[in-house]
């Protein structure tokens, strides 16, 4: 019975199912071939049909089930009747079997703020860099990110293409849904699930940073950290996944531009496995509904060795980035 579960765990279980539906929509838009691209503020700030449909799907599905939630989505969309086929009313039963951390067991619906990025890595999506793309649903309580869901619609898609080639050559057989996409979720005090935690190689400083929003501050900050390697990829969700899967040791973005809906869900996943995400000054990010949407003092995140990176942020960078 639903009433025997806490509001938070019901919300996470529903968000998981909603994020999976979102991933299907993202893949369907690509398959149909018309991305419906619109420039928002610049040539690097884009919106596609997938951004619009996914936001409608997530926000309407959540609002229908949890009418007292505050939901803040990236896209400004006109209020219109939402097609019934965009609504997901299921929930992931596996999550409901997990215990709710005691500090969150009495949370009411109206106490929660949900930050939604329907398509993180839109520019990469339009350019066919599909493994950069994520769908982000972050849940905050009293200004703190406490639960998060990341769907990666094209996780495994390169392996999938190889599989299709093999099938074409009759080298191997696979089921109709050869593991394309995955959903990662986490709750502070409970853990993070849906991936294999791995640390970056010891003693290596591999930095992941922006692919399409770089500037002198970003490059100065990275240089000060003496990196062995710099990965330039799209999407905040994607960069945090690189940290938890050992592909990078730090995510450094010394610039405004990243928003609360980009960081809320990924921050939870990172924190749930002992990592740390702050602005470049070391301040925690705030997620209450009145907060400004821009992370104006940038982002610094690591799975381990946070202090090494934080201590190397140049004073000139800190002065330029005001929280």
Image (cartoon, rainbow, N blue to C red):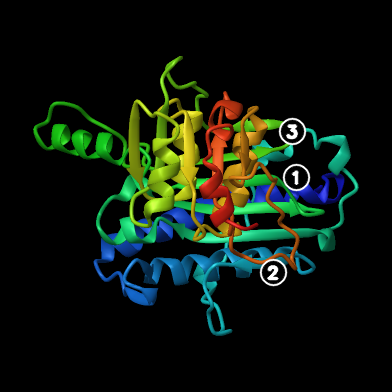
Q: Regarding mark 2 in the picture, which secondary structure is present there?
A: helix
Helix, strand, or loop for circle 1?
helix
Give the secondary structure at mark 3: loop
Residue appearing at x 52%, y 24% in the figure: 197
Q: Distance between the residues labelled 2 and 1?
A: 17 Å
Q: Position of residue 285 (x, y in %)?
A: 68, 50
The answer for how far apart the CA atoms under marks 3 and 1 are is 8 Å
Which residue does the image show at 24% across and 66% down from the upper left? 33
Q: Real-space Cα distance between discs 2 and 3?
A: 24 Å
Residue furthest out toward the top: 202
Q: Residue, x 62% and y 58% (percent of image)? A: 322
Earlier in the chain: of badge 2 and badge 1, it is 1
User: Dot 1 corresponds to which residue?
Assistant: 9
Which quadrant holds residue 190? Answer: top right
Q: Mark 3 points at which residue?
A: 98
Residues tagged 3 and 1 counted as in contact (Cβ below 8 A): yes
Which quarter of the image is occupied by the C terminus?
Answer: bottom right
Left or right: residue 206 versus residue 268 is left
User: As rendered, which of 221 and 264 lies closer to the eye?
Assistant: 221
Whichever of labels 3 and 1 marks the residue nearer the N terminus, that label is: 1
Q: Looking at this view, is 113 or 183 the one in front?
A: 113
Q: Could you say where residue 124 lies in the image, as x and y percent from the top left?
A: 32, 55
Q: Which mark is residue 64?
A: 2
Categorize mark 2 by other alpha carbons within 10 Å: few (<14), some (14-19), many (20+): few
């Amino acid at each position: 019975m639903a009433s025997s579960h806490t509001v938070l765990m019901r919300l996470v279980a529903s968000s998981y199912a909603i994020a999976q539906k979102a991933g299907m929509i993202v893949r369907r838009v690509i398959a149909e071939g018309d991305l419906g691209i619109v420039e928002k503020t610049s040539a690097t700030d884009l919106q596609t049909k997938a951004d619009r449909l996914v936001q409608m799907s997530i926000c309407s599905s959540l609002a229908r089930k949890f009418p007292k939630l505050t939901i803040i989505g990236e896209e400004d969309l006109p209020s219109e009747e939402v097609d019934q086929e965009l609504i997901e009313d299921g929930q992931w039963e596996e999550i409901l079997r997990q215990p709710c951390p005691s500090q969150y067991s009495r949370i009411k619906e109206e106490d929660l703020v949900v930050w939604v990025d329907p398509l993180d890595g839109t520019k990469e999506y339009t350019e066919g860099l599909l493994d950069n793309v994520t769908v982000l649903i972050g849940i905050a309580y009293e200004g703190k990110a406490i639960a998060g869901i990341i769907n990666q619609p094209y996780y495994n898609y390169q392996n999938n293409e190889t599989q299709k080639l093999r099938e074409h050559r009759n080298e191997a057989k696979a089921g109709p849904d050869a593991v394309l996409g995955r959903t990662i979720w986490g709750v502070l005090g409970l853990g993070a699930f849906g991936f294999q935690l791995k640390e970056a190689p010891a003693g290596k400083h591999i930095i992941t940073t922006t692919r399409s929003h770089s500037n002198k501050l970003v490059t100065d900050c990275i240089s000060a950290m003496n990196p062995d390697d710099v990965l330039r990829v799209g999407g905040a969700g994607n960069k945090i996944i690189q940290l938890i899967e050992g592909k990078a040791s730090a995510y450094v973005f010394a610039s405004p531009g990243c928003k609360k809906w980009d960081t809320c869900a990924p921050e939870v996943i990172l924190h749930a496995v002992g990592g740390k995400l702050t602005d470049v000054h070391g301040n925690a990010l705030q997620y209450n509904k009145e907060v400004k949407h821009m992370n104006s003092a940038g982002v610094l995140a690591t799975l381990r060795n946070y202090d090494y990176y934080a201590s190397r942020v140049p004073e000139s960078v800190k002065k330029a980035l005001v929280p």
